[in-house]
Image: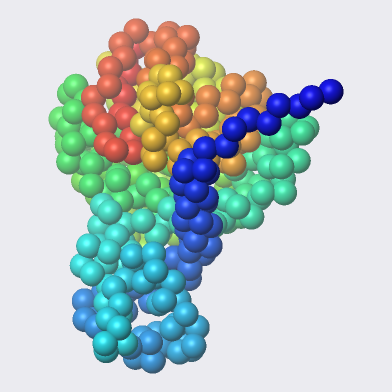
Amino acid sequence: MTVEVPAINEDKLNAFMGQVVGELGATVNAALIVIGDRLGLYKALAGAGPVRPAELAERTGTTERYVREWLNAQAAGGYVEYDAGSGEYLLPPEQALALANEDSPAFVCGAFELATATLRSEPSIEAAFKSGAGFGWHEHDSGVHTGCERFFRPGYNANLVTSWLPALDGVEEKLRVGATVADVGCGLGSSTRLMAEAYPASSITGFDYHRESIEGAREETRAAGLADRVAYEVAPAAAFPGANYDLVTMFDCLHDMGDPVGAAGHVRQALAPDGTWMVVEPIAGDRVEQNLNPVGRAYYAFSTMLCTPSSLAQEVGLALGAQAGEARIRDVATAAGFTRFRRVAETPFNAIYEIRP
């Protein structure tokens, strides 16, 4: 039997191998970014001008030899600049904004904390490929929970109060005079606290099924001096308590749910007659080919490791995935009895929907 061997385009092969080398360096550097974040290396470099490895080590209480190797890896990746003449390293202000300033909308270290923590569940996800079983959010390393909050928080800080809520029809006026709000799937509560800070007359409650996240949200809220404005309860999306809410919010969590239609139905019952459901989801087109880009690539990867297994671990297991797209989110809302649906805003990472009875 003759087996035909396909002709190999050497240029395409070499180009792909170059891509693979870049991927390999980026994969390992993800851990170095987390180390730089946790040890304060980026913060010590920010605004410090050119520094030598020994100086950075002294400022951060670390060991020079490790710091030197870390700096070389950062320089090779374009994260810092290296001066061969002086042997000094510089963190440019643009990189500092992304790596050293947690209040910046460009801050990225949380994304790498999330990514490296996600990879710790690789054996379980590999087994799930064969068994078809799910793997719950609560089963992942705790870095997934804190990293996810730090990943999404910069976008919420930059947009939630300034553009997303004002884009909703009549909602901001209600919040200013005093609305009742349920923040469902609140995680560690960054979105809940942002609303509480901006609208002190409103009553806001954060709900999440993950007890450890709720406990963390309470601690963060006490530290922020907002404990008198915000309450938290452990409750699933399809059974959170309360009624006649003026606003129900879900931030980057609807697609993770096993039964998003059931959760949507509960939201409809819990809303006031003129209430609003705001859903924030990862940005996505409705067709696979629309998502074959860097953002879609990241979201598909996280979806494979986190979102899809999370949904499959729950009842129904609809498994929308992180790249569900507007049409599928609309279908969820329509199946639950909502009649009004519109996209009111978007960012490079999120789409924001206003859904009403």
325 shown above or below 163: above
Is residue 42 something that shows in the picture?
Answer: yes
Residue 37: quarter of image: bottom left
Q: Residue at x 26, y 49 (%)?
A: 157
The residue lying toward the viewer, choosing from 17 and 253, is: 17
The residue lying toward the viewer, choosing from 316 and 218, is: 316
The residue lying toward the viewer, choosing from 320 and 179, is: 320
Side of 156 relative to 213 (left or right): left
69 shown above or below 248: below
Q: Residue at x 30, y 11 (%)?
A: 340
38 shown above or below 107: below
Is residue 51 something that shows in the picture?
Answer: no
Q: Quadrant of the C terminus?
A: top left
14 shown above or below 58: above
Side of 11 relative to 196 (left or right): right
Q: Position of residue 202 (x, y in %)?
A: 26, 38
Residue 278: quarter of image: top left
Q: Position of residue 203 (x, y in %)?
A: 31, 39
Residue farthest toward the front in the current orientation of the protein: 2
Rendering colour mode: rainbow
Q: Position of residue 104 (x, y in %)?
A: 25, 57
Q: Position of residue 57 (x, y in %)?
A: 41, 88
Side of 141 relative to 61 (left or right): right
Q: Residue at x 56, y 56 (%)?
A: 117
Marks counted in the figure total 0
Q: Quadrant of the N terminus?
A: top right
Q: Residue at x 58, y 26 (%)?
A: 319
Residue farthest toward the right in the current orientation of the protein: 1
